Image (cartoon, rainbow, N blue to C red):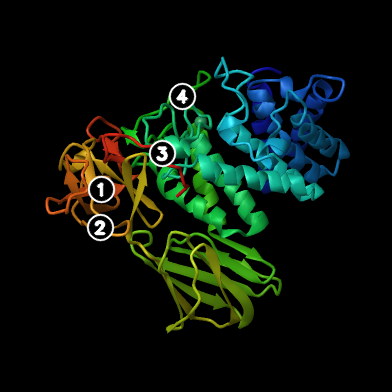
Amino acid sequence: MQHWDIWGRKYTMLGLLAYYDISEDNKALVAAKKLADHLLTQVGSGKVDIVKTGNYHGMPSSSILEPMVLLYKHTGDARYLDFAKYIAAQWETPDGPQLISKALDGVNVGDRFSFPKVWWGWENGQKAYEMMSCYEGLLELYRITGEPSYLKSSEMAVQNIIDTEINVAGSGTAFECFYHGGQRQTEPTYHTMETCVTFTWIKLCNNLLRLTANPMYADQIEKTVYNALLASMKYDGSQIAKYSPLEGQRQHGEEQCGMHINCCNANGPRAFTLLPKMAFTTAANEIMVNLYSESTANVQLSSKNKISVQQKTTYPVGDQIELIVLPDKPEKFTLSLRIPAWSGQSTVSLNGETVQGVQPGSYYKIDREWKKGDKVVLTLDMSGRLIKLNGYQAIMRGPVLLARDSRFADGFVDETAVVQNKDSRVVLVQEEKKPEHIWMSFTAPLVLGTDLEGDGRNAKPIHFCDFASAGDTWTYESRYRVWIKQTLNVMNAAYKPY
Ligand SMILES: [Zn+2]
């Protein structure tokens, strides 16, 4: 029961339960029960303490909370619910990871425990993937018990991760641990943006999006998907990277456990398969559109009327999303469009008429009787946004982070430069001609080789591509960089999340 033993049993249980959900093969449920029953003979009150097993204050072992609650849902057997409650209670003992109290006390996820002597050991309490997996389990337990502190602590932990850890590409960590990555993301970081962290962050945000319908979580998901997640996948879909740093070159991860894959090869595809389910969600009488992409959703609300919603768009290359609403019979319901917080100027039209009151960082709700062919057009603000931190600059366009890539052969990607801007807006010119395996290409005006703002007269158009395409030869031929150094003296200004 040491190292990754119980963590491995967790994934076996999750796999068995997921297989049972789609196949209804009772053997899978029986196997999951046997696995849980065996664990209950080893761990619990008067037996081995779960937070003393494995690494990281017992967080990997404790994350078995999620399948334990799911098993209770499937079987109604109170022993599994009792065990789930036992795990949450053990967290708050002196040896436990104190995931509820430390979150409620506002302790930063990177400061939960003192710096460990052994990084891959029990005393390290900052391991990101495992910590977030525990909150996933806690939210499942909240769904059963309604205990408000379970939801509140998860929300506060996620807000803290946004405020202190998530970088411009929507992921983070150093050596797979929280480390104040928001502030420190401009420094070269070893073993950063583990794809398991990226995936679990998306999954945890999605869990809270479903519970709270707060569009902030969908904004986070979108940023992570278009940047950290897409960057992890090789251009031909044959590989998922283990780490995707903000500068350097893309590369394969190591093989683990004597097999030809690693944890991230396994988790990356899980993130991609979550996307269709997250794009549209429904409440009793509402359809929420969370992600914008060419797609069709077929849903039924409380009336059981069949409703189809089609999205026609090239977003995030283009700025416009057309939604065609096709109910079988006319029906009154709310169609809610996520207006991203970054979109300063968004417009919505309904059957050709522009509507008022569209606010960034909210859902724009249209409540009416919908008829076949009703059309909504959403236009988002895709102007280039300059982000400054620690004497460095990065550019975002909509949800997409941009990067320099040496394949463009227009200078040294690591050189000092000043990105020309007006009120933090950067004029980007879309380029049709681009190297192979690059999705989007733009030029931005840069004054190269200086740290002075100047008057911009010496500015040159320098190429950028979307971060996901940067380095996507997976060879030394494409070195890439997100943060462009401006000032020679790095000043650590107070960090604000983006
Ligand atoms: Zn991994």
Name, please, the residue furthest toward the left: 458
Q: Position of residue 308 (x, y in %)?
A: 55, 71
Dot label at residue 464: 1
Dot 4 or dot 1, earlier in sequence: 4
Q: Secondary structure at mark 2?
A: loop
For this view, does 111 lie left or right of residue 264? right
| Residue under the image location 48 percent in, 26 percent down | 175
Instruction: For marks 1 and 3, give the one nearer the viewer.
Output: 1
Q: Position of residue 455 (x, y in %)?
A: 16, 54
Dot 1 or dot 3, earlier in sequence: 3
- The residue that disc 3 covers is 232
Is 227 or 388 nearer to us in this picture?
388
Instruction: For marks 2 and 3, give the one nearer the viewer.
Output: 2
Q: Secondary structure at mark 3?
A: helix
- The residue that disc 4 covers is 260
Amino acid type at circle 2 is: Leu
| Residue under the image location 28 percent in, 48 percent down | 465
Give the Cα separation between the discs numbered 2 and 3. Answer: 25 Å
Q: Secondary structure at mark 1?
A: strand
For this view, does 147 lie left or right of residue 180? right
Give the Cα separation between the discs numbered 4 and 1. Answer: 34 Å
Instruction: For marks 4 and 1, give the one nearer the viewer.
Output: 1
Dot 2 or dot 3, earlier in sequence: 3
Give the Cα separation between the discs numbered 2 and 1. Answer: 9 Å
Question: On the rendered image, what quadrant is the N terminus found in?
Answer: top right
Res. 48 in view: yes
Instruction: Assess disc 3: are there few (<14), some (14-19) or many (≥20) residues with their C-alpha within 10 Å of its C-alpha.
Output: many
Q: Position of residue 146 (x, y in %)?
A: 79, 50
Instruction: Assess disc 2: are there few (<14), some (14-19) or many (≥20) residues with their C-alpha within 10 Å of its C-alpha.
Output: many
Res. 24 in view: no
Q: Say if mark 2 contacts mark 1, CB within 8 Å.
A: yes
- The residue that disc 2 covers is 428
